[in-house]
Image: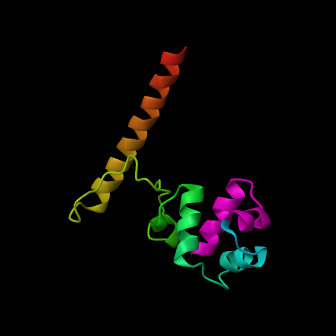
Amino acid sequence: MIGKRLTKLRVKRGMTQKGLAQILNVTPSAVSGYETGRNSPSDEIKCKIAELFEISLDYLLGLTDEEVSLNRENVVVLDKEVNFEVRENLRMFAHIMDKGDSDNKTHKKE
């Protein structure tokens, strides 16, 4: 899971394996190994990756599909008993509210 996520994050930001390797202070072949699943990054490297791409370790490790910010901004913790349908409705509502907030900020600048 880390490999696919790392590749996606790197490509999304227009980085090469060599460039990422320099930032992480590892070899390009190490980055290639992480992305193909041949090697697993150390915990220290995982933390560097999370900081660099501003994502949570939960996302990097595949525990969630949400690209949650490393600093956990805009995160709401729900009780374990909240069912899937309610969670999805809340997620959709939050998305709509966030979009509405962005629209309001745009109008205020004009």
Q: Residue at x 75, y 75 (%)?
A: 27
The reply to whether the magenta stretch includes residue 6 is yes
Query: Splitting the image into 4 quarters, where does residue 49 fall?
Result: bottom right
Q: Is residue 27 left or right of residue 47?
A: right
Picture layout, residue 52 above or below residue 26:
above
| Most frequent secondary structure within the magenta stretch | helix
Q: Residue at x 55, y 71 (%)?
A: 46
Verify whether residue 2 appears in magenta.
yes
Q: Nearer the viewer, residue 24 or 85?
A: 24
Seen in the image, is 92 located left or right of residue 30? left
Q: Residue lying farthest top? A: 110
Which residue occupies the foreground of this view, 87 or 98? 98
Q: Position of residue 87 (x, y in %)?
A: 31, 55
Residue 7 in picture, x, y percent from top left: 67, 66
Q: Nearer the viewer, residue 27 or 7?
A: 27
Image quarter (top left, top right, bottom left or bottom right) of the N terminus = bottom right
Which residue of the protein is positioned furthest toward the bottom in this rendering?
Answer: 38
What residue occupies the far front of the structure in this picture?
Answer: 25
- The magenta segment is 1-23
Q: Please identify the quarter of the rendering in which residue 9 is found.
A: bottom right
Looking at the image, which residue is at 74% across and 54% down?
14
With respect to residue 42, does 51 lie above or below? Answer: above
| Left or right side of 91 for 27 | right
Which residue lies at the image location 63% right of the left edge and 71% below the top edge?
4
Residue 23, image x, y percentages = 69, 62
